[in-house]
Image (cartoon, helix red, strand yellow):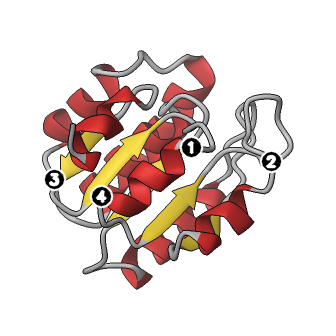
Amino acid sequence: MTPEGALEEIYNFRWCAPDLASAGQPLADEFLLVAQAGFEVVINLALLDADYSVPDEPDLVRALGMEFIHIPVIWEAPAPQDFQHFCAAMRRCRGRKIFLHCAANMRASAFLALYRILELGWPRAAALAEVEAIWHPNLQWQAFIDCHLAL
């Protein structure tokens, strides 16, 4: 199996574009597959001290030759500045192969949909369909999405 094919074993893995993938939390050994697939940047929207997290993920990712960007988004309280930091990171890494993840690809899919709509001009229905393929946002996350789309 190729590294690209093996990536599909990562929880809720999705190819978003040839140079962009999103997923839930990879296991420690799955980060090697991410590196072997040619990803240059790992953006983590989850918390580093949660039960599901990989110990020393930043060091592991860097040791594999990838840049690590951490934007800790509290599940119960996603904040507008979190999304602003995410957009800045995506702009800064444009042209590089990005692996975006959180715990279950819920935060990641919501942020990516908003980025695609607000920054890249995607149609709302197309971007939000990517979210719906993974989960149905709860009231708090739907309000977060709606608030950004109302701007």
Which numbered disc, 4 or 1, marks the residue that appears first in the sequence?
A: 1
Q: Disc 3 residue type?
A: Trp
Crowd class of label 1 (few under 14; some 14 to 19; many from 20; radius 10 Å): few
**Residue 37, numbered label:** 4
Relative to 141, is 101 above or below? Answer: below
Cβ atoms at labels 3 and 1 below 8 Å apart: no
Residue matched to label 2: 55
Which one is in front in this view, the residue at disc 3 or the one at disc 1? 1
Q: Secondary structure at mark 3?
A: loop
* Residue 139 image-quadrant placement: top right
Q: Residue at x 52, y 51 (%)?
A: 31
- Which x, y percent locates residue 97? 30, 69
What is the quadrant of the C terminus in the image?
A: bottom left
Which numbered disc, 3 or 1, marks the residue that appears first in the sequence?
A: 1
Q: Disc 1 residue type?
A: Asp
Which one is in front in this view, the residue at disc 2 or the one at disc 3? 2
Estimate the spatial distance between the alpha carbons at disc 4 and disc 3, rounded to whole Å.
26 Å
Relative to 84, is 49 above or below? Answer: above
Instruction: Judge whether residue 98 can be spotted in this image.
Output: yes
Crowd class of label 3 (few under 14; some 14 to 19; many from 20; radius 10 Å): some
Which numbered disc, 2 or 1, marks the residue that appears first in the sequence?
A: 1
Which numbered disc, 2 or 3, marks the residue that appears first in the sequence?
A: 2
Residue matched to label 1: 29
Q: Disc 4 residue type?
A: Ala
Q: Is residue 103 left or right of residue 113?
A: right
Residue matched to label 3: 122
Q: Disc 2 residue type?
A: Pro
Which one is in front in this view, the residue at disc 4 or the one at disc 3? 4
Instruction: Judge whether residue 151 can be spotted in this image.
Output: no
